[in-house]
Amino acid sequence: MKRAFSIAILLLCVYPLFARENSAPKPNVLFIAIDDLRDWTGYLGHNPQTKTPNIDKLAARGVWFTRSYCAAPECNPSRAALMSGLRPFTTGVYNDYNDWRRVIPEDLPLTTTFRKAGYYVCGAGKIYHKSYNRLSEWDDYLADEGTDPEPTGNTGVDGIKFAPLNCADEDLRDWKIVRYAIEQLQKKHDKPLFLAVGLRKPRRPWNVPRKYYDMHPLAEIKLPPYLENDLDDLPSAGVRMAEPKGIHAKILKSGRWKDAIQGYLAAISYCDAMVGRLLDAFDKSEQATNTIICFWSDHGWHLGEKHHWRKFVLWEEATRSPLIWVVPGVTKPNTRCDRTVDFMTIYPTLTDLCGIPTPRHVQGESIRALLANPEAAWNKPAITTSNFQNHAVRTEDWRYIHYADISSEMTLSGLLRRFGLGGDPTPANGGEELYDETKDPNEWTNLAGKAEFEAQKKSLMKFLPAQNTPDIGGERDAE
């Protein structure tokens, strides 16, 4: 009797502490997505021409990754994978014309998981690829962000559009997107807040107010690392992806390579100004002390490296983009992490940090341990997929690229496999690339054909997916 009485007294003493701990408010989430921002930020130091003081200040608040990679080097598949937790080779969403809503039910995305957990989930700008928004996932979403002004005069080269604008910052859509976010930060919310802010610059066209062009004088622009015979040791699939006779040839003929780089740098600087405006408002808000900030970009960008422009390839420039985390009570200021991660870690890390069970379908692991200790053990490579059966495996020291064999896709087995009707599930080898990133950060020397690197190559091949879902198809003019 005495023992039971003692246990009851103990429970009465402990329960208030337990209840107080579990009644602590859940952290808010500020989810900042940037369109087409490669590793040209000040804090990463990859290009000293870039000017990103506000993004650099954000990095100084928490943990910033030096090796962070997208799931796909294209807007729609990258964003669909990150938001759903399902990789492109699982969903069959590989391109901008794939309507991911056909294969990713509404109960799976990150937004739905947070709403089920009691969050008020709202957003503005580009979180998903704009053709395929699903507004029913959100409690509120900015309905009309407007359009950007059009420039006059010379507007660029082929699809690479760039020109200074004679307008003010507030005339662009990103100003309105940030204004919506500021209004949400200033509101009283009776639920924890998940606020997604999708900035559209530096996506093309690189048309921003002239003052941002003036920050990067054309006479001072330097070209990126470039090797004239860079494609000579690539398999034919790699050369096809590079498209050396496409945009790059037109840029060279126009003589405006530096002009285009100036435009991209100007667009980054405008984006940085909008990030600064958002963070200034955040710091003045009631959410400032209990909010997780996750900052990411959907993929990188080529500006002539490997004779290529834009994304859609599996090399470093197209697959690497910024990732910054600021987590109260977990991250320490200005902490660098050199572990290799991909953006499939974002969904499970957010649920982990917010005390929400991670759905079983999510194909990624939380990196909470790395946020607390950037030198913690981590042996997961980054996996990036570009179109059906083309994959890159990136570790801290190596990049391995495996291309599908296009000729094998024209066989009966290949056609059956491509359209999900059977066939051999193992992709034929259409060529390989292997780079020693410690000695060759520009990926100029393909080691895949050298016998002395066969063991290294095989150690990376084991991370290739065993199954590749066929492309789900769609209208190719979708944007």
Image (cartoon, rainbow, N blue to C red):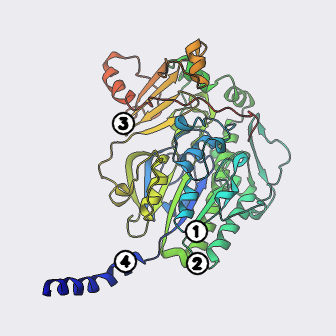
Mark 2: amino acid: Asp
**How many residues crowd around disc 3 within 10 Å: few (fewer than 14), some, or many (20 or more)?**
few
Question: Can you tell which mark lies on residue 397?
Answer: 3
- Name the quadrant containing residue 112: bottom right
Q: Which residue is mark 2?
A: 190
167 relative position to 370: left or right: right
Residue for point 56% across, 74% down: 191
Depicted 215 relative to depicted 12: above or below: above
For the residues labelled 1 and 4, the Cα–Cα distance comes to: 29 Å
- Residue 47 percent across, percent down from the top left: 53, 46
Q: Secondary structure at mark 1?
A: helix
N-terminal-most mark, 3 or 1: 1
- Residue 85 percent across, percent down from the top left: 51, 47
Residue that extends furthest to the left in the rendered view of this protein: 2
Mark 4: amino acid: Glu
Q: Which residue is mark 4?
A: 21
Q: Secondary structure at mark 4?
A: helix
Q: Name the foreground residue: 216 vs 246.
A: 246
- Residue 286 percent across, percent down from the top left: 55, 79
Question: Can you tell which mark lies on residue 279?
Answer: 1
Q: Nearer the viewer, mark 2 or mark 1?
A: 2
